[in-house]
Image: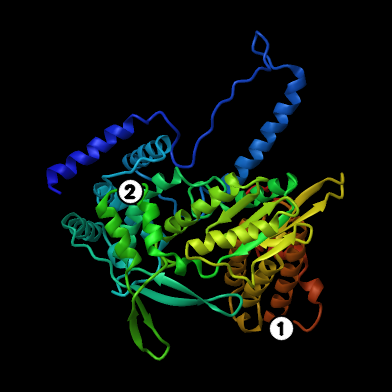
Amino acid sequence: MSQEQSKTQPDAQASQTGQAAGVGAEVGGGHSKRATSWQDGSGNIAPEHLAWLKARRRASARTQAWQRSEGQGDGSAKTEITTPEKVRKLQRTLYRKAKAEPKYRFWSLYGDIMRRDVLELALQRVAANKGGPGVDGQTVESIMVSPEKQEQWLDALQQELKAKTYRPSPVRRVFIPKSNGGQRPLGIPTVKDRVVQMAATLVLMPIFEADFHPRSYGFRPRRNAHQAMQEITRALRSGRTEVLDADLSKYFDSIPHSGLLRLVARRVSDGSVLRLLKMWLRAPVWEEDKDGTKRTKPNLSGTPQGGVISPLLANLYLNGLDWAVNEKVIGKPVLVRYADDFVILSAPGQGKELLERLRTWLTARGLKLNEEKTRLVDSGQGFNFLGFTVRRQASRKHGRWYGHVEPSPKSQQRLRESVRDILNHWTCWKNTTEAVGELNLCLRGWSGYFHFLHSSRVMGKLRWWVERRLMRWLWRKHARKRALWTDYPIPMLYDRYGLWPMPLTAGWTRPTRS
């Protein structure tokens, strides 16, 4: 393609997408105003509707408070980075066009990926996410050392993309331990590959966001795990009490490349973009054993966990399952998915049929269930999802059935293990301020996620345990022989030593942040 053609095609596509500028909203959706018939001629609300409207506003305020406390969504960088207005405008245009025309194929996106403002934003986000070096040993810090170095590095990368000489490097694979004693493979691309993947994600994400089902919550803008748990409680209240707790076997490592690229090609006809994705998917894997042996293996299937674009592609491959279960099955079961973790809630007696149909759907697409972890349960027995235990039970106050959500026993045990690593007999040498500061960081992080819905009982129990653990640590540190409880009373832990108080209120009445 000549330079003149590459300049005119984005403009032509932008003019086409401009026709849909009034359709939809930017990624994440918006709110629409509903006209009411409760007002009289003077515009006053009828008294019989006033109480209902106030209750609705209070509920809306609680939901917005949850969303503010949880941020804009999971998977984003810890450091908030403002998206430039030109990039935001590009994303809005792509989203609106995709939403207005579900069968439209975007044919000129490569030029948007190599735009300088897109590459600069991609580099900022990769730097904020940090991460280790790839096979070339280059670190993010070596690039961000100065503005001049960043400009030189981006100039070279942009030139490679323009000349189409860019080639991804092998993916460095490391293994991280799992809670069950196994190991999870993690692929680490080079910094250059991560930046280009982030640029592609910034451009492709709005297109596929227009197609994703609203009950998919993992690694999507303005969506998080708490919203997924709320959807589950709504399904339980509607009478869908039989739960299919499904677990996919090595999902990220088993996605067929050909099937995934066909799904991308339904929306993207730009050959240069498809070529980029194909190169990333087929990039070889580089491993190093404990004895120092190094080897490179071909990657025949899957998208590596750790790749920047992997969550988007993983969501795309399971999007068909979201729509098939939620919209096309008799009885209207509810599938709630977070990345590769999902549950299906259905009417009693429907679970076995759904399990067989799920196996058939997955087998046809090269995937399979982990039969040891997949199970059918009654919601009254309880099940675990995203670190929470969910159980349908009757309220003690008014006897109504509801979905009770609290941190799972395994999540509680992980917090205890983390606190034990900070407060034990071989850390007594630490400065008290340093140790308590590290403890507070652990407690804040855990509570920030698990202080949700019906967590008060668990929070109170863990707070009691943490207080006793800190008491005993101080007692040992100062070599006390007696008076464990009188020398370090509970008020002193908070007033003198600065222990952060774990919240004891319900998850929807969040205390003021300190």
Q: Secondary structure at mark 2?
A: loop
Q: Nearer the viewer, residue 234 or 38?
A: 234
Local crowd size for mark 2, using a 10 Å CA cut-off: few (<14), some (14–19), many (≥20): many
Q: How is the image coloured?
A: rainbow
How far, Cα to Cα, is label 1 from label 2?
68 Å
Mark 1 in CB contact with mark 2 (< 8 angstroms): no
Q: Relative to 46, does residue 140 appear above or below in the rendering?
A: below
Which label sits in the foreground, 1 or 2? 2
* Tally of numbered tags: 2
Q: Relative to 302, does residue 52 appear above or below in the rendering?
A: above
**Residue 375 x/y as whole percent:** 68, 65
Residue 159 falls left or right of residue 245 = left
**Residue 39 x/y as whole percent:** 67, 15
Residue type for callout 2:
Val
**Residue 340 x/y as whole percent:** 54, 61
Please say whether residue 8 is visible from this viewpoint: yes
Q: Residue at 60% x, 75% y: name it.
A: 179
User: Which of disc 2 and disc 1 is earlier in sequence?
Assistant: 2
Q: Nearer the viewer, residue 402 or 351?
A: 351
Residue 261 falls left or right of residue 423 = left
Residue 261 falls left or right of residue 30 = left
Residue occupied by mark 1: 479
Residue type for callout 1:
Ala
Instruction: Give the number of the disc on residue 428.
Output: none
Residue occupied by mark 2: 268
**Corner quadrant of residue 77:** bottom left
